[in-house]
Amino acid sequence: VIPGWFSEISPMWPGEAHSLKVEKVLFQGKSDYQNVMVFQSSTYGKVLVLDGVIQLTERDECAYQEMITHLPLCSIPNPKKVLVIGGGDGGVLREVARHPTVEQIDICEIDKMVVDVSKQFFPDVAVGYEDPRVNLHIGDGVAFLKAVPEGTYDAVIVDSSDPIGPAQELFEKPFFQSVAKALRPGGVVCTQAESIWLHMHIIEDIVANCRHIFKGSVNYAWTTVPTYPSGVIGFMLCSTEGTAVDFKHPVNPIDDSKSDRPLKFYNSEIHEAAFCLPSFAKKVIEGK
Ligand SMILES: NCCCN[C@H]1CC[C@H](N)CC1
């Protein structure tokens, strides 16, 4: 370990580790589920780390939060009821709240410490909790979804950590089945789907599961997040049987012209570009 540096070492990305220079550790705690740490970095603002894995930095969180939210919500004409699984930092809530047609935003986060730490150290991310449409549930997303009546939501966003730790079940078939049941016909789900450079096998399994379960569209999109391993992160975009959803062509553009916090990353061109895959990934994901 180099003094004054944080290195993201994990068996999920063997032989490599992204490092950030540490100015000051601001919080260290252990919740019922994981180790939670916040540090002030030299060049990426404050950083949230769970079990040694970077979850977000102030400098580049916009890329992930905007893409995981607007890729699904800009692909359907009239999202009203949205469910967020995970996402305890509040960033996805902040982005969902940009959609005026949305009437109800439910969030189920397993770890209350993540919510409290985000409100204390990342106010511009946790601002999402201030929207009156938000209902916070502290609990396991798997159990939450089992209790949801069939066809409740227009969109579900699974903003999870990685399959090692509390989020493990969010990558398994039964969970995807419970998401499909909770969605209305033509409803959409967007999940955090790892890196095409590091996790093609995980992605292959997720795509196979989704093709069995979601009878509408099944697409993989990706974007750049400098502080995630390999500098990229992907998303599974799926829709249930019903009104066709063409994820590659947004039908519901965002108007942020009157917003006091305009979009920093997402736009309709980058929406379309996100679905363009390198050949090694296209072969596995689209079977071409
Ligand atoms: N809402 C915070 C983002 C959580 N998603 C991250 C994706 C990349 C992973 N290595 C860590 C979690």
Image: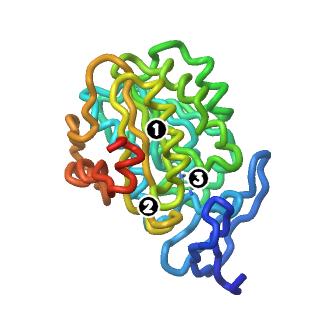
Percent of width and height locating residue 119: 58, 52
State the residue position of label 3: 119
User: Foreground: 66 or 25?
Assistant: 66
* Screen quadrant of the C terminus: top left
Per the image, label 2 sits on a secondary structure element best described as strand
User: Foreground: 244 or 56?
Assistant: 244
Q: Is residue 190 left or right of residue 118?
A: left
Label count reads: 3
Residue 172 vs 19, above or below: the answer is: above
Percent of width and height locating residue 155: 41, 29
Per the image, label 3 sits on a secondary structure element best described as helix
Residue 111 vs 122, above or below: the answer is: above
The quadrant of the rendered image in which ligand 1 is seen is: bottom right
Say which mark, if any, is on residue 232.
Answer: 2
Residue 64 vs 183, above or below: the answer is: below
Say which mark, if any, is on residue 207.
Answer: 1
Name the N-terminal-most of marks 1 and 2.
1
| Residue drawn at 62 percent across, 17 percent down | 147
Q: Amino acid at mark 3?
A: Lys
Marks 3/1 in contact by CB < 8 Å: the verdict is no
Quick one: label 2, few (<14), some, or many (20+) residues within 10 Å? some
Q: Is residue 268 left or right of residue 45?
A: left
> How far separated are the C-alphas under marks 3 and 1?
34 Å
